[in-house]
Amino acid sequence: MALVSPIPRHGDVVVGRDVAGRTLRISGHPGTGRVVLSIWQDNVCKATVRLAVDDVPHVVEMITRSAITPADEAEAGHAG
């Protein structure tokens, strides 16, 4: 676990809302074809997941799908 605090050159930082100092860093690494998701507590990296670029659309879809509430799903079913 790193004690450094690099800011992603290609990416962004999302501040967590549950624990003070918790962030999700999303960093692209075009040279290696990876996108790295890392969970930080203050300046300490707690965990990382290295995704292949081809996996990113699936992860985005799962995040989007997870954000839909049951009420949203019911409305979507009646929209057609």
Image: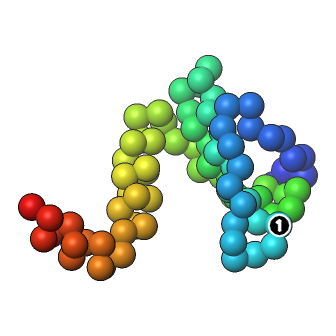
Quadrant holding the C terminus? bottom left
| Above or below for 20 versus 1 | below
Q: Nearer the viewer, residue 65 or 33?
A: 65
Q: Is residue 69 left or right of residue 50?
A: left
> Which of the 4 image quarters holds residue 56?
top left
Measuring from the top left, give residue 47's x and y in whole percent.
69, 58
Residue at (66, 38) in percent of width and height = 11
Q: Residue at x 75, y 75 (%)?
A: 19
Image x and y of residue 9, in percent: 74, 31
72 sits left or right of 18 in the view: left
Is residue 46 in view? no
Badge 1: few (under 14), some or many (20 or more) residues near its Cα, within 10 Å? few
Name the residue furthest front. Answer: 79
Residue extending furthest toward the left? 80
The residue carrying mark 1 is 21
Residue toward you, 68 or 40: 68
The picture places residue 65, in percent across and down from the top left corner, at: 35, 62
Task: Find residue 59 and report its horizontal and vertical position in percent.
Answer: 43, 50
Question: Height in image: 52 above or below 19?
Answer: above
Q: Is residue 78 visible?
A: yes
In this rendering, the answer to whether 74 lies above or below 35 is below
Quarter holding the N terminus is: bottom right
**Amino acid at pointer 1:** Gly
**Which element carries disc 1, helix, strand or loop?**
loop
Residue drawn 62% across and 49% down? Answer: 37
Which residue appears at 87% of the width and 47% of the height?
5
